[in-house]
Amino acid sequence: MSKKEWPLWEVFIRSKQGLNHKHVGSLRAADSTMAIENARDVYTRRSEGISIWVIESNNVFANDSSESDALFEPADSKIYRHPTFYDVPDGISHM
Amino acid sequence: MEKQKALYEYVLRLADDSLILGHRVSEWCGHGPILEEDIALTNLALDLIGQATSLLNYAGELEGKGRDGDALAFLRYEREYKNLLLVEQTNGDFGKTIMRQFLFDAFRKPLFEKLQHSSDQHLAAIAEKSLKETKYHLKHTSEWVIRLGDGTEESHNRIQESLDALWKYTNEIFYKDDVDSVLIAENIIPSSEEIKAEWTKTINDVLEQATLTIPSNNWIQEGGRKGFHTEALGYLLAEMQYMQRAYPNMTW
């Protein structure tokens, strides 16, 4: 018997209310068809979604976490990039 | 045969197919070959038991003797169960479970497609709801039959053995007696010829893709629709009914 494991897939689900697909987890499957069926059974059994995307985890590229300082910290001191310096006139709700 | 009696018998047959197969598949819970498939099988078992609940409750109403779905599920004797011999067969390996389910789903899908237009409204409503579940079951089992059949040498040989072992029970799927004739005349159920044509097409298509061969041995075995079962059913009922037999009327 082969001990080789099936490839890992990342699963993205779009909920009824949501506009975008959200990452919900991962699973193993032999190919994309079975990955979608497995995602249906594992991640939508409580009506969580109306659309499923799967992508082989091999195809996901991530940043190097040791470079976090260089990548993300410079933004911390640039508070002027947030639109928080405007006075919102009275009577404007939902802001 | 009177229509009401025929309908009771027919609904009981559908119900028992769902109940017994549902119980069989539920035996996989916690034992699936991989986590993903364990959940898939459990979902499938729950769908079948849900169908059995609706059908058995309806059968109880038709019978009119005050028995509800629970009484019919748990308090009958072996000879009173009218399920197909196919569905009571033991799980075997994963391939055998999948093959048993595939042979059944290929029948249930066209059956529910027709039954949703039944002149009996209650049966039509149950069929419409069950059809959506059954379409997925058939898709899932077809994909697996193809992958196991057209997979490795070992998976091919093992699922071919399962097909060989189960084939003799498939003729009974299209068993027909007075019950069917009465209901066909009333437009309550479709003729078995219509269903058989679709079943045969699905079986041929999928088995061809799976590189599997239909056994040439034409030995057939049947009896389930009349209450004559294989050895397998008694053990299943002993486990399924234990709680109600040991503690009558218990609930939780």
Image (tube, coloured by chain):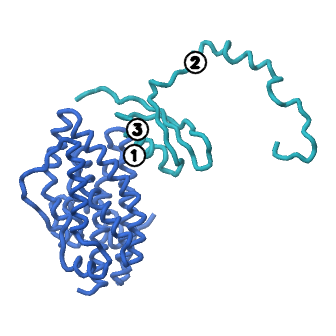
Q: CA gap, disc 1 to disc 2?
A: 33 Å
- Mark 1 or mark 2, whichever is nearer to me: 2
Residue B25 visible in the displayed image: yes
| Residue B28 image offset from top left, x and y in percent | 31, 48
Query: Of B199 and B230, which appears nearest the observer?
Result: B199
- Chain letter for the residue marked with disc 2 in the picture: A
Q: Are marks 1 and 2 in contact (CB under 8 Å)?
A: no
Q: Is residue B144 above or below residue A3?
A: below
Q: Are marks 1 and 2 on the same chain?
A: no
**Quadrant hosting residue B151:** top left
Identify which residue, B232 or A9, lies in the foreground: A9
Q: Earlier in the sequence, mark 2 or mark 3?
A: 3
Name the spot of residue B37 as percent of width and height, x first: 36, 43
Q: Amino acid at mark 1?
A: Ile
Name the residue tied to disc 3: A35
Residue extending farthest bottom? B2
Label 1 packing within 10 angstroms: few (<14), some (14-19), many (20+): many
Q: Position of residue B5 (x, y in %)?
A: 28, 83
Quadrant, the C terminus of chain B: bottom left
Residue A63: assigned label:
2
User: Which mark is drawn over residue A23?
Assistant: none
Callouts 1 and 3 on one subunit: no
Task: Indicate the secondary structure of the residue bearing disc 2.
Answer: loop
